[in-house]
Image: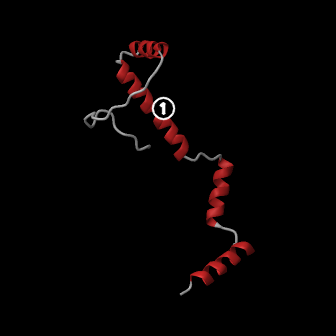
């Protein structure tokens, strides 16, 4: 699973501040009250969930069954390098030889 910071496992010694409108604060406070949490708990928990979702979306690759088969097939039976790659390798080797 994702490597996300654990809740309440370390002392809270960092501060995070944000400016919001009065309407936003009232709305967040209402949501916090409805869930039985303080405003701080609600904001921290909601931000943690949103951050974990965003990180997962950017770190996890999801493939259809057809894409999975194509990926594994390419790994197991890679195609031969083309002429441009061969030329680039030769050029690199010539430039980096002592």
Q: From this viewpoint, which residue is outermost toward the left?
A: 11
- Residue at 55% over, 41% down: 57
- Residue at 49% over, 12% down: 23
Instruction: Where is residue 46? Give x, y as percent.
Output: 44, 27
Instruction: Where is residue 98? Give x, y as percent.
Output: 53, 87
Q: Within the image, what quadrant is residue 10 found in? A: top left
Nearest the eye: 35 or 42:
42
Instruction: Where is residue 28? Give x, y as percent.
Output: 44, 17
**In this picture, is 77 found above or below 25?**
below
- Residue at 66% over, 81% down: 90
Name the residue beneath numbered marker 1.
50
Q: Is residue 58 left or right of residue 39?
A: right
**In this picture, is 63 found above or below 90?**
above
**In this picture, is 34 found above or below 61?**
above
Q: In this view of the protein, can residue 82 be seen by the observer?
A: no
- Residue at 45% over, 31% down: 49
Q: Check disc 1 and report its element: helix, strand or loop.
A: helix
Q: In this view of the protein, can residue 54 be seen by the observer?
A: yes
Q: From this viewpoint, which residue is outermost toward the right?
A: 83
């Amino acid at each position: 699973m994702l490597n996300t910071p654990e809740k309440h496992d370390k002392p809270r010694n960092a501060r995070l501040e944000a400016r919001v409108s009065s309407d936003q604060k009232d709305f967040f406070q209402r949501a916090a009250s409805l869930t039985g949490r303080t405003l701080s708990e609600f904001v921290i928990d909601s931000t943690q969930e949103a951050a974990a979702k965003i990180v997962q979306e950017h770190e996890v690759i999801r493939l259809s069954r057809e894409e999975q088969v194509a990926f594994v097939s390419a790994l197991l039976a890679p195609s031969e390098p083309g002429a441009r790659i061969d030329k680039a390798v030769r050029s690199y080797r010539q430039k980096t030889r002592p």
